[in-house]
Image (spheres, rainbow, N blue to C red):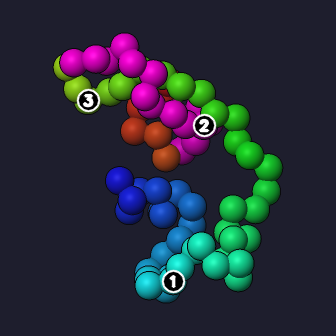
Amino acid sequence: GPGKLTKAMGIDGTAHGTSFLTAAHRGILRGEPSPTVAGGRIGITRAVYLPWRFGDPASRSLSRKF
């Protein structure tokens, strides 16, 4: 969810209420893009074959490895 996403991005509660759509805050996504892979969905019983799970295979934030 959004809490895990912001934690992985290094965003903490001090940014509460901040709009990241303004030019002043767009720099939060600096650096080179990570390699992204797609895989089957997890934690469900239907349509698990659909490649609707995306992520960096080297990320420490994955709940399960690809």
Is residue 41 placed above or below 24 in the rendered structure?
Answer: above
Which residue corresponds to mark 1?
Answer: 18
Q: The disc labelled 2 sits on which kind of residue?
A: Asp
- Amino acid at dot 3: Gly
Q: Position of residue 1 (x, y in %)?
A: 35, 53
Mark 2 → mark 3, Cα distance in angstroms = 19 Å
Dot placed on the residue nearer the N-terminal end, 2 or 3: 3
Residue depicted at 44% across the width and 85% down the height: 17
Q: Earlier in the sequence, mark 1 or mark 3?
A: 1
Q: Residues within 10 Å of mark 1 (few under 14, many from 20)?
A: few
Figure quadrant of residue 55: top right
58 within the magenta span: yes
Name the one closer to the observer, 8 or 25: 25
Earlier sequence position, callout 2 versus callout 1? 1
Residue contact between numbered discs 1 and 3, judged by CB atoms under 8 Å? no
Farthest residue, direction left: 45
Which residue was labeled with disc 3?
43
Queried whether the magenta region covers residue 28, the answer comes back as no
Q: Nearer the viewer, residue 53 or 8?
A: 53
Task: Give the quarter of the image for residue 50.
Answer: top left
Dots 2 and 1: beta carbons under 8 Å?
Answer: no
Residue located farthest toward the top when viewing the structure as drawn: 49
The three-letter code of the residue at mark 1 reads Thr
Label 2 vs label 1, nearer the camera: 1
Q: Which mark is residue 2?
A: none
Residue 27: percent from the left, percent from the top? 73, 71
> Which residue carries the number 2 mark?
56
Look at the image and give the residue range highlighted in magenta. Answer: 46-60
